[in-house]
Image: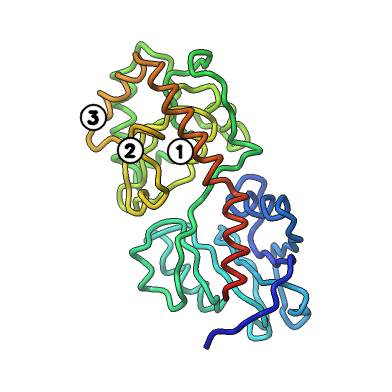
Amino acid sequence: MIRKYNIKKRLLMCYGKTHYSPGRYLEDALRAIGTHVETHTSVIDFSKIDSKKYSGVIFVETNKTVEVKNIHMAKMPKVFWVHHGENRLERNLNLEKRYKPDLILMSHSLHLSKHFSAKVKFFPFGMDTRIFNNNKPLQKRSYDLSFVGNRHEKFYNERNKTLTLLHNHFSNYNTSLYSNVYVSQLSSLYSNSKIVFNESHHNVHPINMRIFEGMGCGALLITDEVENQRLLNLVDGKHYIIYRSSKELIDKVGYYLTHMDEAQKIASEGRKYLLQHHTYEHRARTLVRLMSSI
């Protein structure tokens, strides 16, 4: 049965809050569009919440989960934003039972929708315009090629092989492929990089945040292609560059490092497209609209 609620610009948000995370970016964007956000980061008891005051509640997947009490008393739209795929499916299915959402938002891996009881919508990560936003010309950037991400041998063996290939092939260039950069320094590195390389997890294949971080910082993104990526409406050769083999990756990185005018045009178009369609303000407006339809 579909329940209709009176929508107000007041929202509950439950997640393990950190400075640099999709949940935090979305929270700030909601505030930016005029939504009053009340966060709960450790526990929420709906027996103490006046449901009439809120347009809904969003639970955001984070490493730290919020303890939820008396969920049956939450007489408002309930949404659960899922960030991971197969590697955390069982955990997220258990969280769905705890949160009892009306709607599941998935950042990627839509083929897993069948496992959830609630209706599922595509809700990808986005560009945080306060942090990952730079239009510095590529010619003035120090690093030719950069990457920051998990390199754990158990989970990222294929990625490590690709990084070794890039490191060896472009040894005469100024690269940053193995830096242990904190998230607070990530935008500085990407904003000083001509090309940002992206390769997803080979077993999970997510639409990861690196896509939005690299492109938002004005670098040329060269990336593999994963399931649901086309739903972003990004065009290969216009907004970013897709590679489908190791040889193609080497060829394309080499080409754009020696054709910087073309690289600049694509990088600029990519950043422009994110600003027009994929900021967290866009996500915030979408969330408010989705909640009003529950």
At x 60%, y 70%, the residue is: 291
180 vs 291, left or right, is: left
Query: Could you tell me which secondary element the residue under label 1 belongs to?
Result: loop
Q: In this view, does 27 lie above or below 272?
A: below
230 vs 211, left or right, is: left
- Residue highlighted by disc 2: 159
CA distance separating discs 1 and 3? 21 Å
Foreground label between 2 and 3 = 3
Query: Could you tell me which secondary element the residue under label 3 belongs to?
Result: helix
Residue 58 in the image: x percent, y percent? Answer: 62, 67
- Residue highlighted by disc 1: 149
Residue 89 in the image: x percent, y percent? Answer: 41, 66
Query: Could you tell me which secondary element the residue under label 2 belongs to?
Result: helix
Nearer-N-terminus badge (2/3): 2
The residue nearer to you, when weighing 169 against 191, is: 191
The residue nearer to you, when weighing 146 against 271, is: 271
- Residue highlighted by disc 3: 248
Q: Do labels 2 and 1 touch, CB within 8 Å?
A: yes
